[in-house]
Image: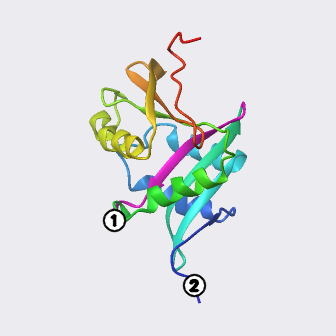
Amino acid sequence: MSLGPLIRAANPQDLMDILAILNEWPKHFVGPARSMVTDDFNNHRTLIFENHGTVEGFLIWREIDGKIEALWLAVMPHCCNHGIGRSLMNALFAIALPEQEIFLLTATTDSVVPNTTFDGPAYAATIRFFLGLGFKEIATVPNYWGPGNHCLVMAKAPHGQAFSDPRSNVN
C-alpha cells in the first residue's frame, strides 16, 4: 500500500522519475540540463515529493560556504499550482540552520539558448514563485551559462534576520 503525499529523501531509483519530469518541461530543461541534473542528483541531496507511489516533484540542493543552494526544482506540469514546489521549498527551509541563507540561480526572462526550445519569458513564473517565497533578486550575471543565457541570483535571508543586499556599501 502506498502512502498519500509525502516528502522524502531520494533513492537511486528516483533518477528515472526525475528525468521524466524534465522531459515534461522542454522549454526549461534544454542542452546539457539533463546531464547536469544527473550529476547533481548523484553528488548532492535530493528531496522527492511523492503521492501514492508516484514522484510528482523534486528539489536538488547542496550546502556550500555555509549557505544552502537550491540547484534544481521541478514539478510535473499537471501538478503545478497544487503546492508541491512550495512544500519542497518549505522542507528545505526546515532543514536550514537558523543562520543559513538559501540562494539559487535561475534564468532571466531575456535569456536565450540558440537552436533549442528554451523559452526565457517562461521564467517569469519561476521568478514570481521564488519572490512569493521571500527570495529577493540579488544580481544578474550576463552570459553565465553561455552567450545570451543570463543568470539571476536570488536569495532568502536566514530565519528571523533582515536580508542584507551584498551589493550595498553599508558598513
**Is residue 15 shown left or right of residue 66?**
left
**Is residue 87 shown left or right of residue 95?**
left
In the image, residue 119 sits, relative to residue 23, either above or below, namely above
Which picture quadrant has residue 120?
Answer: top left
Do the residues bearing badges 1 and 2 touch, measured as CB atoms within 8 Å?
Answer: no
Identify the residue position indicated by label 1 in the image.
78
Depth order, front residue of 78/146: 78
* Residue positioned most to the bottom: 1
Depth order, front residue of 2/171: 171
Residue at 44% in and 33% down = 136
Q: Position of residue 153 (x, y in %)?
A: 48, 28
Identify the residue position indicated by label 2 in the image.
2
Please report whichever mark, 1 or 2, sits nearer to the chain's N-terminal start.
2
In the image, residue 141 sits, relative to residue 105, either above or below, namely above
Q: Residues within 10 Å of mark 2 (few under 14, many from 20)?
A: few
Q: Secondary structure at mark 2?
A: loop
Depth order, front residue of 56/159: 159
Residue at 45% in and 56% down = 85
Magenta region:
65-78
In the image, residue 8 sits, relative to residue 1, either above or below, namely above
Please say which color scheme the image uses. rainbow
Which picture quadrant has residue 116?
Answer: top left
Q: CA distance from mark 1 to mark 2?
A: 20 Å
Say if residue 117 shows up in the picture: no
Marks counted in the figure total 2
- Determine the main secondary structure of the stretch shown in magenta: strand
Depth order, front residue of 167/111: 167
Amino acid type at circle 1 is: His
Residue at 54% in and 19% down = 166
Q: Position of residue 119 (x, y in %)?
A: 30, 37
Q: Secondary structure at mark 1?
A: helix
